[in-house]
Amino acid sequence: MIIVTTNKTTAQQLAENLTTGDPLKPVFVHNNRVALAGVKTLSDDVLAPFKADIVDIITKHHTAIASSRDFHPEDTVITTKHSIIGGDHFVFMAGPDAIESPAHVMAMGEAVKKAGATILRGGAFKPRTSPYSYQGNGEAGLKAHRAAADALGMDMVTEILDTRDVDLVDQYTDIFQVGTRNMQNFALLKALGQKRKPVVLKRGMSATIDDLLNAAEYIVAGGNTQIILMERGIRTYDNKYTRNTIDVSAIPVLQSLTHFPVIADASHAAGVAQFVAPLALAAIAAGAQGLMTEIHNDPAHAFVDGAQALTPAEFSTLAAKARRVREVVQSDLVAQ
Ligand SMILES: O=C[C@H](O)[C@H](O)COP(=O)(O)O
Ligand SMILES: C=C(OP(=O)(O)O)C(=O)O
């Protein structure tokens, strides 16, 4: 049961009063509204003395509160050293799939920065389908990634796979990334909820929109409100021509339900370089507030996911078109 009150003092009393037998936890405070979440459903008698200040009682299972736009109407805008993410801003996160070497991540960083990216992506811990595939170069990769981001004046985003690595990755990165395969790794989400750094939360490849919002809720419930949601394609019945199916509709739907920035990764959605740009532009047309894109100077020899990597020149063209589409989406054009 979730109880929403308009009065912080009442909420306090309510929380204290109802602690016995059913600990109610204040999960979110915003604009003088406090949501209290507990396991049990409380009877009307118990709630009666507090009725005047209770604005909502939610008994529906699977309701995200702190992530909801009802509770937090304004867009969340996240500011990092080199980027502003969310609201009317548009951000490019780009780079190689995996950190291959210090020189390579530096060269890829230079290329994406030139095209307008402010966030350098790259994985040092790679979630691979097969245990025999390249798993990433761990801390050496994090160091190389950090050095490139610093030298170029960019932010760093990298994937975290394991709760045991949270503190290690935290030493290097500006933004954590939770990949599609870990969207419901609740231990990891709780651990990131304890951090005060942005988290890119990718949609699970078989996750519903509510699953994604509840995964975000795990992070916010810990006190970390800097979440960036990412649509990266879901599994559908046809994966012969594309790797996944980008759910373009999820972008405006998520933006209507939640205040967090919504960004798209067309690289993992398409799985094929040829289709990355059209899907990316479609995502922006649908309102995406940024793009994550993979690039490689020699896709045929990329350590991971070469088939979906754009060359630096292709990324530069996409970035220019992306800005144009974004301008149209944000313009006040009216029919003549
Ligand atoms: O970034 C990438 C992931 O590690 C990759 O897409 C997983 O793909 P795989 O199925 O080839 O391991
Ligand atoms: C593994 C990645 O993506 P996803 O989790 O979307 O597959 C990635 O971005 O490197």
Image (cartoon, rainbow, N blue to C red):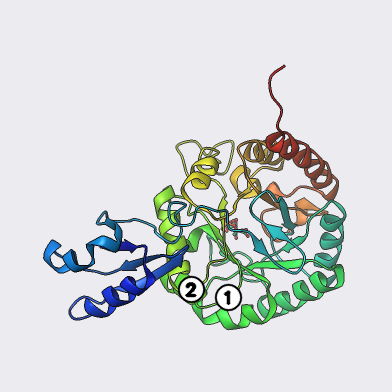
List the single residue furthest toward the top: 336
Helix, strand or loop under label 1: loop
| CB of mark 1 near ligand 2 (< 8 Å) | no
Task: Determine the residue positioned at 65% across, 38% down.
Answer: 279
Q: Is residue 103 above or below residue 254?
A: below
Image spot of residue 106 (x, y percent): 84, 67
| Quadrant containing the N terminus in the rendered view | bottom left
Task: Determine the residue positioned at 28% across, 77% down.
Answer: 13
Specify the quarter for ligand 2. bottom right
Q: Is residue 246 above or below residue 60?
A: above
Q: Foreground: 248 or 298?
A: 248
Q: Are marks 2 and 1 in contact (CB under 8 Å)?
A: yes
Amino acid type assigned to the residue bearing label 2 in the image: Gly
Image spot of residue 225 (x, y percent): 53, 67
Amino acid type assigned to the residue bearing label 1 in the image: Arg
Q: Which residue is mark 1?
A: 196
Q: Is residue 274 visible?
A: no
Label annotation for residue 50: none
Q: Which residue is mark 2?
A: 223
Helix, strand or loop under label 2: loop
Q: Foreground: 67 or 158?
A: 67
